[in-house]
Image (cartoon, grey):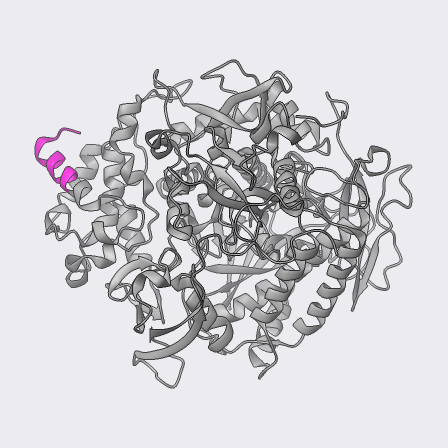
Amino acid sequence: MTATIDEAPASAVPEIPSFEVTLKVRRYSPESEHGEEAYWDEFTVTAHGTDRVLDALHKIKWEHDGSVTFRRSCAHGICGSDAMRINGRNRLACKTLLKDVNPDKPILVEPIKGLPVIKDLVVDMEPFFASYREIMPFLITTGNQPSGERRQSAEQRERFDDTTKCILCAACTSSCPVFWTDGQYFGPAAIVNAHRFIFDSRDEGAEQRLEILNDKEGVWRCRTTFNCTEACPRGIEVTKAIQEVKRAMITRAF
Amino acid sequence: MQTHQYDVVIVGAGGAGMRAALEASGEVRTAVISKLYPTRSHTGAAQGGMCAALANVEEDNWEWHTFDTVKGGDYLVDQDAAEIMAKEAIDAVLDLERMGLPFNRTPEGKIDQRRFGGHTRNHGEAAVRRSCYAADRTGHMILQTLYQNCVKQDVEFFNEFYVLDLIVDHDLSAGHVPDGEEVNATGVVAYDLATGEIHIFQAKAIIFATGGAGKIYKTTSNAHTLTGDGMALALRRGFPLEDMEFFQFHPTGLAGLGILLSEAARGEGGILRNGDGERFMERYAPTIKDLAPRDIVARSMANEVREGRGAGPNKDYVLLDLTHLEPAHIDAKLPDITEFARTYLGIEPYTEPVPVYPTAHYAMGGIPTNVDAEVLRNNTDVVRGLYAAGEVACVSVHGSNRLGTNSLLDINVFGKRAGRTAAAYAKTATFRDLPEDAADSVIATLDEMRGRPNGERVSDIRRELQETMDANAQVFRTEDSLRTCLADIRTLQDRYKNVSVQDKGRLFNTDLLEALELGFLLDIAEVVVIGALNRKESRGGHFREDFPDRDDEKFMLHTMAYRRPLDDSATVESVDGTEGVFSEQSVFDTYKVMLGGKSVVQTRYEPMERKY
């Protein structure tokens, strides 16, 4: 044996004792005996102080029921795989500490709303990405490429900083009541990504994007309920970005 | 079962895969197969930056960058490859800027640059500002920008498809194929997660860009999905893996969790302190202190802890101190990582130091390639139609220890090269017939695993693997610890034969895929440990307490690990004068792992003692 630390360093925060937590997971598994009926399944697991909802879901999958299905990858809030409804609010499971969502009561875990459920907590993301692709989410320029880098002042860069943080997790779009009732609406995430380019001083495609978003399913459908801003795990001021896009549409100033 | 035909098939949609796709898809019919949606790839978790000698803020040049890379890798770097990377870095950054990447800017509006570990002015004089960055989410911005340009270019993706086999016309794992004989990669077998259906992709050229294997360890900055798939598939087909014993432990993982806190924190002025409050890096690297390369900092931290100078109630971590920095500066330059500290540990980095400990971060080794990203099947022969780039590959630009930022650079430079060479090759090549039974073994494996009523649980075997790797093959290693680890792996490999899954369904069966990924992890861990046992020296990320010095006479060589059938009497290639050095062999079941050696390419720089 080496002098290597045999156990991983213990939790660094003041110790929070282990606790029991119950998760009520919304399940949909057309291959199972439940068929096309969605149902609730309840699991109780032991959690530790800094455990997140994702840790509890892993415990369920790894120790209780391997068929419980959800997406996840990075497990620290940057890949955007594990957006889900936790106690009725859209959150990333990997960024939501159990102790912060009242573990004394069963924690409700459901798939995000407004997108077709494939299995358990997994939804079909294609409609979401289709809206994203539609707003031309890439830098549009004309003329020759510059020999070096394009110049941009720190202030110009700052103008769209907030919306570059988007990880396309769909927490915002699937929290939007307009999106729930009308699947055709572009949704906040697509508008956020349009914002990211419309306000980029290097971009020359703003007019085209604004035309696309001027559509009947575009920005005007937004009813400013702020659900999206509350849902964003990256802290993007989504509603503000949508308002800025609306204003740009009227003033054509960006 | 469905079959497809593409000129170029790219496996993996992280930075390297998408950078390759941008080159290839404009030229030839190209498909990208990815086990995740592209924007979920772990490139997005990279934080600090991408180095290139733009000299935007102070004097710099690519030759200094090359030197730093070679020295940082403890001279096991192939210097021709490092030179290419440092030269092409400049265009790689400009490419990304023109694609739209929102870099932070200087007052003049140029791309801003900051300091990073091991990157120095004039061969080690002092830290240099070389890292181009976008706050502390540079990898996120690279991944987004590449994906955006893939959307622009209408690149075809097969998302949530798992490649489970590589089809070749000569199976080296089945028996000896003489050196020089032509071996062609002809396709891949993939599994569609959503439906459970098998897809065969016939291709003229295949690029592996599947990323790393950090999940062989328990404490890691890596995503759950980084299970060494591409490396293991190559190994199983008889292709070598190079330098797998070199695994990087990033110094600043959040203690207990392993979540990465970028080196940019130290680049921006953060300081590491032990439990006594001492800035201990002054003792280990007097010149560049906290900005020494990662292997040195990680070892220094582990050493502080084992000598009783750790912090916290159990004295089992050290502290990353940002409290002397202006909160506004922290917010502007390090917003994400400070949020990680707040979210996961409840620590406020403005006023409290953050508990950190090394976390398994990056595989320096991988599938050997030449500088055109062509995969090698021994020291000289390339596999026709097979390419690799990014963490899955070993060019080798990182040698025994990668410098911070050079991974984002690697994926861009060699991703681009892979895309170009693969497309050029595909234009001249023809499709080769696939065997009728190309998918049979994959289907049999899946059916068997799904059909086994009950047996070993995936999570038990995986946890035990990760625990033994953390305990025995981490920052410090010895013959004893590694023998223990290999014995543990053998036991787990035996148990794996009886692994079973609870989800027997076809739709979105992640239970089944975790079982397959565990198989990859075991294969990779085995090769890491055998390589580490053989390398009786300490170099870069590989530190043997029983052989604490670098031994250039015996070990200035790349390790080439091969899996061969037990009855294969052919030897693997070694290098003149090194007979007997790479003698470690390990037999398991139906195969043995054999180690060969490959020369290190040295051009400009003579190996020197590595001091900072």
| Image quadrant containing the N terminus of chain A | bottom right
On the rendered structure, is B364 left or right of B275? right
When the figure is inspected, residue B237 is found, relative to residue B56, above or below; the finding is below
How far across and how far down the image is residue B109, in percent?
Answer: 34, 19
Task: Mark yes or no: residue B505 visible.
Answer: yes
- Total of numbered circles in the picture? 0
When the figure is inspected, residue A203 is found, relative to residue B537, above or below; the finding is above
Given residues B140 and A143, the one toward you in this image is: B140
Task: Mark yes or no: residue B434 visible.
Answer: no
| Image quadrant containing the C terminus of chain A | top left
How far across and how far down the image is residue B24, in percent?
Answer: 50, 40
On the rendered structure, is B6 left or right of B544? left
Residue in view at x 64 percent, y 38 percent = B300
Magenta stretch: includes residue B317: no
Q: Residue furthest bottom?
A: A33
Q: How would you classify the magenta stretch by its main secondary structure?
A: helix
Determine the image quadrant of residue A28: bottom left
Determine the image quadrant of residue B438: bottom right
On the rendered structure, is B187 left or right of A73? right
How far across and how far down the image is residue A145, in percent?
Answer: 38, 22
Residue in view at x 67 percent, y 33 percent = B73
Given residues B375 and B286, the one toward you in this image is: B286
How far across and how far down the image is residue B265, in percent?
Answer: 47, 34
When the figure is inspected, residue A153 is found, relative to residue B582, above or below; the finding is above
When the figure is inspected, residue B471 is found, relative to residue B440, above or below; the finding is above
The region drawn magenta spans A243-254
Determine the image quadrant of residue B402: top right
Residue in view at x 63 percent, y 20 percent = B124
Q: Residue furthest front?
A: B276
Given residues B333 and A81, the one toward you in this image is: B333
Q: Residue furthest top?
A: B59
Residue in view at x 87 percent, y 51 percent = B571
